[in-house]
Amino acid sequence: MNATVQEGYPRPLAEAKGREAPLGFVDILLWSTLVFSTLGFCVYHYSLLNGIIPPILGGYAAAASVLVLPIVLPIYLHRASTKPEFLTIADLLFAMFTVMVVIVALISRSNPGLEDVANFQLSIVPQFVAWFALFRCVRLGATPLRIPSVIAFGLMTIILLIRPSLYLASVSDIATMFRDDVADYQAYAFVYLVMFIYILGIVGRSPLRYFIYAAGLVALFVNGARSELIAAPLVIVTFEIFFAVRFPAILATVIIGGLLSFGPVFNLLANLFPENRFISLLTNVGSDQSYSERSYFFERALSVISESPFWGNYGAYPLGEYAHNIVSVWVDFGLIGFLLFAFILFLGLANSLKAYRENRDLHLSAMLAATALCMVMLSITAKYWTYQMFPILLALQARLIYWRNSAKGRIS
């Protein structure tokens, strides 16, 4: 192994035989960009809700991607141009999927009734590219960044616990939710989940991870985004599989303890948080409006696919009324788009399993496995294909593939 270790780490930091590469200006810049995209989102909306600043950046996500792209994209392109082996099949898959989205949306936006859907999807592309390039290049395990990253995660948690409701504007109809000047609990839950996975990849086997587990679960519960709350235990189990010394015993204890305490704990939470969205879904699924609407959207998507199984029917739904699962890809991009999306998810799981069996690249591999499991679960149960964990999944896949193929085992 090369004496300098930088990206991914072939073993936990405490066990690495080689010295860690020094932190450079580009590393600090990329890390700052990650914090700007996550903690910055929370600080911005907290300031808005408290009347400290006007909505100068709209809903933040789109504006942040425009500000981030000129930083992360040139770094990514420079590394790709100077090191041909830097590019992997995952980079190619990301480019293929992104180009497909742009071409189909541009062609479709000229058709009456499809402008809103096409424009929304085109607005997602810069955000896709920004997240991909950022996670393709940002340092994932630098020791000097550990404490600052924990502080950033802690601040995000505190902000969420203080102001769990992050609606910038009142949402009276579904179309309003897709204005750029509106941010909701789901957008917050996404950036929080991203930082949750990132910080766990940094701390690795440190006992600090148990505090992060607890903080993440509490924050996402208070937030009310049910999909991310369900994804969080998947992330926790994944990291324990990779890092726990006695994982089977720990997992058995957690499962048994969870089963024994579920009833009393759930009753307590139901009394303390009667309006919580997660509690409302568990207590009365049939009357949950979100669940009923999503079931209807899914049935309509299946009807569209049955009528045109190969081509689908791009934008065959009012804005926002898409199937909240992987079927949405089939509706918009036909069978080919669906198979491409599904293959990317499968590749993420396969690379994670291979890395686990080889017992190497633990920090990077654990992050990839957690992201892949989240994407698979959420794509099957809850999320539109525009969910921005997707480009992060591809970026982490590309990093792991490059790490394996690189003769030096590092990125300078």
Image (cartoon, rainbow, N blue to C red):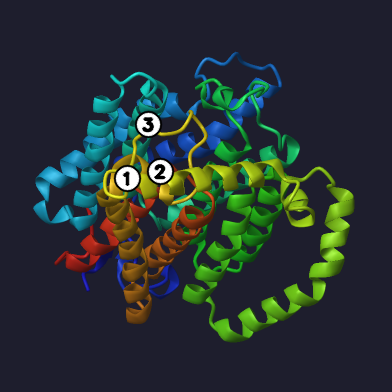
CA neighbours of label 3 inside 10 A, class few (<14), some (14 to 19), many (20+): some
Q: Amino acid at mark 3?
A: Gln
- Is 153 displayed left or right of 361 in the figure? right
Q: Give the quadrant of residue 359.
A: bottom left
Circles 2 and 3: CB atoms closer than 8 Å: no
Circles 3 and 1: CB atoms closer than 8 Å: no
Front residue (pair 288, 200): 288
Q: Amino acid at mark 2?
A: Val
Residue 121's mark?
3
Residue placed furthest toward the front = 307
| Location of residue 291 in the rendering, given as x and y in whole percent from the top left corner | 65, 47
Quadrant assignment for the N terminus: bottom left
| Location of residue 40 in the rendering, given as x and y in whole percent from the top left corner | 53, 32
Front residue (pair 404, 7): 404
Q: Which residue corresponds to mark 2?
A: 304
Residue 204 higher or lower than 57, as above or below: below
Mark 3 → mark 1, Cα distance in angstroms: 21 Å
Q: Secondary structure at mark 1?
A: loop
Q: Secondary structure at mark 3?
A: helix
The first of marks 2 and 3 along the sequence is 3
Q: Amino acid at mark 1?
A: Ser
Residue 308's mark?
1
Residue 217 higher or lower than 275, as above or below: below
Residue placed at 19% from the left, 50% from the top? 92
Counting labels gives 3
- Is 255 displayed left or right of 62 in the figure? right
Q: Give the quadrant of residue 34.
A: top left
In this view, the mark in front (2 or 3): 2
Q: Is residue 205 visible in the rendered structure shown here? A: no
